[in-house]
Image: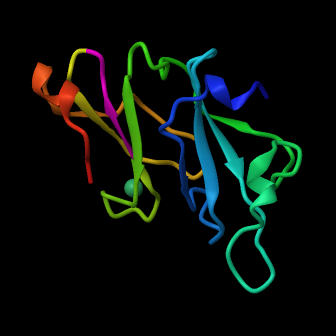
């Protein structure tokens, strides 16, 4: 993968795959994709931190596409992952788009599907919010 300087500061760590081990979802601004890096369980609980440090060291040894396109910071200036909000047991993603609208994306265990649901219509107000969740 490329250096972390191209990644947005909205990466998040939660158990996405459902195996009880923290995973890393991050954005590649260069490709407009979201990527999933799966963590390896540590002896005694938690995650082997090094397994999240590089693609090669991760569970499966490869980062997989979590969001295929349109996730660049030009169209989505602010992206945040939160614990499960819709009750399906999978952490979810909230996106503040460049037009100020806020969309909810129900997380998937391997990838996002669909284009999410608009929660708040376009308004400049949300462009300046500093926290969700
Ligand atoms: Ca969910």
Query: In this image, 56 relative to 116: left or right?
Result: right
**Residue 121 vertical placement versus 36 (above, below):** above
Query: In this image, 57 relative to 20: left or right?
Result: right
Q: Where does the image place residue 16, in percent across and percent down from the top left?
A: 57, 56
Query: In this image, 128 relative to 18: left or right?
Result: left
Q: Where does the image place residue 24, in percent across and percent down from the top left?
A: 63, 49
Along the line of sight, the residue nearer the viewer: 69 or 29: 29
Q: Quadrant location of the C terminus?
A: bottom left
**Residue 39 vertical placement versus 121 (above, below):** below
Q: Residue furthest bottom?
A: 44
Instruction: Tell me which segment is drawn in magenta.
Output: 93-98
Q: Residue at point 13% right, 25% down?
A: 121
Q: Quadrant of residue 31?
A: top right
Q: Quadrant location of the N terminus?
A: top right
Q: How many numbered discs sit on the rendered protein?
A: 0
Residue 123 seen by the camera: no
Query: Quarter containing ligand 1?
Result: bottom left
Residue 21 lies in the magenta-colored region? no
Q: Where does the image place residue 66, in percent across and percent down from the top left?
A: 59, 36
Q: Residue at point 81% right, 44% down?
A: 54
Q: Residue at point 57% right, 20% down?
A: 29
Q: Residue at point 42% right, 13% down?
A: 74
Question: Which is the main secondary structure of the residues drawn in magenta?
Answer: strand
Q: Quadrant of residue 68?
A: top right
Q: How is the image coloured?
A: rainbow
**Residue 89 vertical placement versus 122 (above, below):** below
Residue 42 seen by the camera: yes
Query: In this image, 93 relative to 37: left or right?
Result: left
Q: Where does the image place residue 40, in percent across and percent down from the top left?
A: 78, 64
Along the line of sight, the residue nearer the viewer: 61 or 11: 11
């Amino acid at each position: 993968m490329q250096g972390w300087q191209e990644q947005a500061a909205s990466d998040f760590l939660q158990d996405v795959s459902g195996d009880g081990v923290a995973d890393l979802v991050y954005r590649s601004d260069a490709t407009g994709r979201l990527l999933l890096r799966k963590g390896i369980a540590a002896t005694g609980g938690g995650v082997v931190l090094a397994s999240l440090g590089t693609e090669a060291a991760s569970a499966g040894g490869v980062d997989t596409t979590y969001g295929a396109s349109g996730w660049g910071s030009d169209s989505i200036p602010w992206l945040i992952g939160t614990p499960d909000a819709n009750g399906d047991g999978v952490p979810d993603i909230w996106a503040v788009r460049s037009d100020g609208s806020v969309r909810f994306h129900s997380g998937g265990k391997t990838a996002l599907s669909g284009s999410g649901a608009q929660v708040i219509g376009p308004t400049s107000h949300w462009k300046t919010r500093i926290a969700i969740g």
